[in-house]
Image: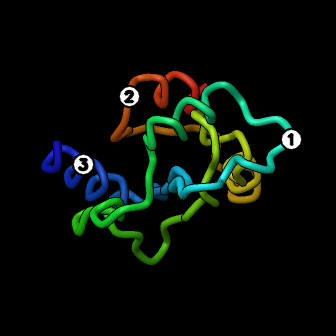
Amino acid sequence: MLENLRALARGARGVGIRVLFVLHQQWTPGDYVHWRNPTPYQLTSASCQTFARMPGAALHDDSQVQPGDLLVSKHWASRGLANADLDHQLTQHKIQKIVEHVHRGDWSVRDGAR
């Protein structure tokens, strides 16, 4: 997987395609305690500590943001568009087509690319 990711990023940057990083907000105890409307997904991920902040939860050394890349604000849901600035970044930078590479479950691919 890492070699594929390296090749994808290298190839994209090599032909002038911008690389965007859309990261999950890392869960910490108490994150949803005072939320008015947490989603069932958020409550379940909190109870399982799916995206818990822990050592090793950072970007892999081979997946660091480089000059020219875009770092989208961390999102709190299963989709990069929900509670993040991905749509704003895509619009402002006139990005109309994306290629998506996901490290997590298939729901991220379906929901994020939509």
Q: Nearer the viewer, mark 2 or mark 3?
A: 2
Label 2 sits on what residue type?
A: Gly
Where 108 sits versus 34, above or below?
Answer: above
Measured as percent of width and height from the top left, residue 101 is found at 37, 39
Q: Is 15 in front, or is 20?
A: 20
Q: Secondary structure at mark 2?
A: loop
CA separation, marks 2 and 3? 16 Å
Residue that carries the numbered disc 2 in the rendered image: 105
Label 1 sits on what residue type?
A: Arg
Left/right placement of residue 11 relative to residue 77 reads: left
Where 76 sits versus 108, above or below?
Answer: below
CA separation, marks 3 and 1? 38 Å
Q: Nearer the viewer, mark 1 or mark 2?
A: 1
Looking at this view, name the residue that lies furthest to the bottom. 67
Q: Secondary structure at mark 1?
A: loop
Q: Nearer the viewer, mark 3 or mark 1?
A: 1
Q: What residue is shown at x 48% (from left), y 23% (from top)?
A: 107
Q: What residue is shown at x 80% (from left), y 50% (from top)?
A: 34
Looking at this view, name the residue that lies furthest to the left. 3
Q: What residue is shown at x 34% (from left), y 69% (from top)?
A: 64
How dense is the environment of label 2, judged by Cα within 10 Å: few (below 14), some, or many (20 and up)?
few
How dense is the environment of label 1, judged by Cα within 10 Å: few (below 14), some, or many (20 and up)?
few
Measured as percent of width and height from the top left, residue 88 is found at 76, 53
Q: What residue is shown at x 71% (from left), y 30% (from top)?
A: 39
State the mark number for residue 36: 1
Left/right placement of residue 50 relative to residue 14 reads: right
How dense is the environment of label 3, judged by Cα within 10 Å: few (below 14), some, or many (20 and up)?
some
